[in-house]
Amino acid sequence: MPSYIAPTQDMAFLLHDVLKADQSDIPGYADLERDFTSAVLEEAGKVASEVLTPLNVVGDQEGCRLENGVVYTPTGFKGAFEQMKEGGWTGLDMPEEFGGQNMPVLLGTAVGEMFSAANQAFTMYQGLTHGAASAILAHGTDEQKATYLPKMVSCEWTGTMNLTEPHCGTDLGLMRTKAEPQDDGSYKVSGQKIFISAGDHDMSDNVIHLVLAKIPGGPEGIKGVSLFIVPKFNVNDDGSVGSRNGVSVGNIEKKMGIHGNSTCVMNYDEATGFLLGDMHKGMRAMFTMMNEARLGVAMQGLAQAEAAYQNAVIYAKDRLQGRDVTGTKNPDGPADPLIVHPDIRRSLMDQKSFCEGARAFLLWGAQLIDQAHRSEDKDADGLISLMTPVLKGFLTDQGYDMTVLAQQVYGGHGYIEEHGMSQFTRDARITQIYEGANGVQALDLVGRKLAADGGKPIMAFFEMIKDYCKDQSEDEAMTDFIEPLKTASKHLQASAMYFMQSAAKNPNNALSGSYDFMHLFGHVCLGFMWARQARAALDALATGEGDATFYETKLTTARYYMARRLPATSMHLARIESGADTVMALEADRF
């Protein structure tokens, strides 16, 4: 059975040495002292390793089942969910007034990575509830907040998001689900939704569905979509669970991965619903949840890569196969361990440098969210909005690739279910698809985010990289990290300039290069994160305190990323500048 140990030392390094959270003036960050964050991370790590990891394989093998209209989760899930609730993990970064602990998103993200790495399918139940609660918090009335949030923060009730229908995925303007207004101010919601993660289960007393639907007579297309709160059980005036609403599970989807999560077909038959936010402004309210979910999915991509990498390292050190071409390393054995071979090292270094760079990128993104919300910083809000499709698209694409590399280390044993490596690959695959497929993320990045606010966020990012490189340029010890970052940043600027110059003549030039741009951007962000980690490691070594081996390993890994991974920006730029001609040249009927 695969194992997982939470990378708490790396997280502490990022929180305090790189992001310097405890020195920040963001409200609430003064509480993030090393001793406090270490205690939280260590305890969360124990829950991840001891409670959630053993259930990961159980969930994969058993899946969920639908019997007589009731959805049952895999063996052990219900007990583990009770432990999560009792430990207060479900409301770690939610407001105290609704039962949360009001911790920053930064700390909640670090903890969330551990739980997702240990058991992604399980963690989605509370993750989706968190997103639904955030939408109600941002757009609900005082009455709605009082009714739903305390029990959703505690996960006594859980939540979902209902967007997709059988005939429409990304194009939500085509949806057919209707919401008929009633005299008492409620609505009768009818229609079918598919691919609803955590759509129903036996771990909570109620499920609060957030459902997109159209009110008859409203505007056509996406402008006529509204968002509704539709509980599985109606809620009585005293807040208790009442009669069953017109909501039922039509089926549990049979999926490639995340078997432990109940992905449901949901049927709404004149179910009582309540408008959340403004009429015909449903997408505005839903995007509160979707943007949070996209960052959560980015975290899942990293988490699966990390778990797979840890197991690949164990196997590479243990499995004896062949001899080191430079000389025997295990003279008392029949062969040397796999890890002596350069190609295995390349694979493991690709994985390690991605995971540690991606973790820094993700936590930096979480810090920007805190800065935007807690400090009401519009510049930070613009920057994280720009980064969201990069985080989601790049970290999930690369995260999936890393699980494949980890599986490959095992050779044929990686393909056999006995070793459990295929689950990481199968579970990671969905992250590239849900919450907006990665192709859509790339289109959003190029088509909307680059030009947002007159291009202010992307220009601010370029200036940030420029200033950082300038500040570090006089330190020779940073040359290995700053020079590659400068080159990669120039590639990113050149690609953005290409879009500006060519898109007006032919919009397909920008659209056909959007996916490469997203990856180019992602590599620059990880390059920036590795430069910052290198700086922090050098500073720590200069003090003569702490774990010198850890800091030296950071520098070695940073050099690897800069030398072996970051040069991919050149390839992406070349593809972008080739334009749309070769992409669009073949007529549709010739495919």
Image (cartoon, rainbow, N blue to C red):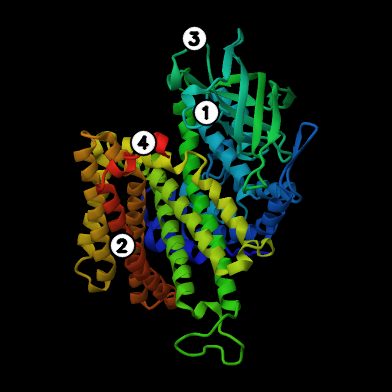
Tell whether label 4 touches label 1 (CB within 8 Å): no
Q: Quadrant of the C terminus?
A: top left
Q: CA distance from mark 3 to mark 4?
A: 40 Å
Residue 297 in view: yes
Graded by Cα atoms within 10 Å as few (under 14), some (14 to 19) or many (20 or more), the crowding at tag 1 reads some
Q: Residue at x 46, y 51 (%)?
A: 397
Is 289 placed left or right of 152 in the picture? left
Q: Earlier in the sequence, mark 2 or mark 4?
A: 2
Q: Earlier in the sequence, mark 1 or mark 3?
A: 1
Q: Earlier in the sequence, mark 3 or mark 4?
A: 3
Mark nearer the viewer, 3 or 4: 4
Q: CA distance from mark 1 to mark 4?
A: 25 Å
Rendered position, 232 above or below 542: above
Q: Which mark is residue 168?
A: 1
Read off the residue under disc 4.
Answer: 587
Give the residue type at disc 4.
Answer: Glu
Give the residue type at disc 2.
Answer: Pro
Read off the residue under disc 2.
Answer: 567
Is 296 placed left or right of 426 in the picture? left
Mark nearer the viewer, 1 or 3: 1
Tell whether label 3 touches label 1 (CB within 8 Å): no
Q: CA distance from mark 1 to mark 2?
A: 39 Å
Q: Residue at x 41, y 73 (%)?
A: 551
Q: CA distance from mark 3 to mark 2?
A: 54 Å
Rendered position, 395 above or below 453: below
Could you say where residue 526 lies in the image, as x and y percent from the top left?
Answer: 36, 58
Graded by Cα atoms within 10 Å as few (under 14), some (14 to 19) or many (20 or more), the crowding at tag 4 reads few
Mark nearer the viewer, 2 or 4: 4
Read off the residue under disc 3.
Answer: 217
Q: Which mark is residue 8?
A: none
Give the residue type at disc 1.
Answer: Cys
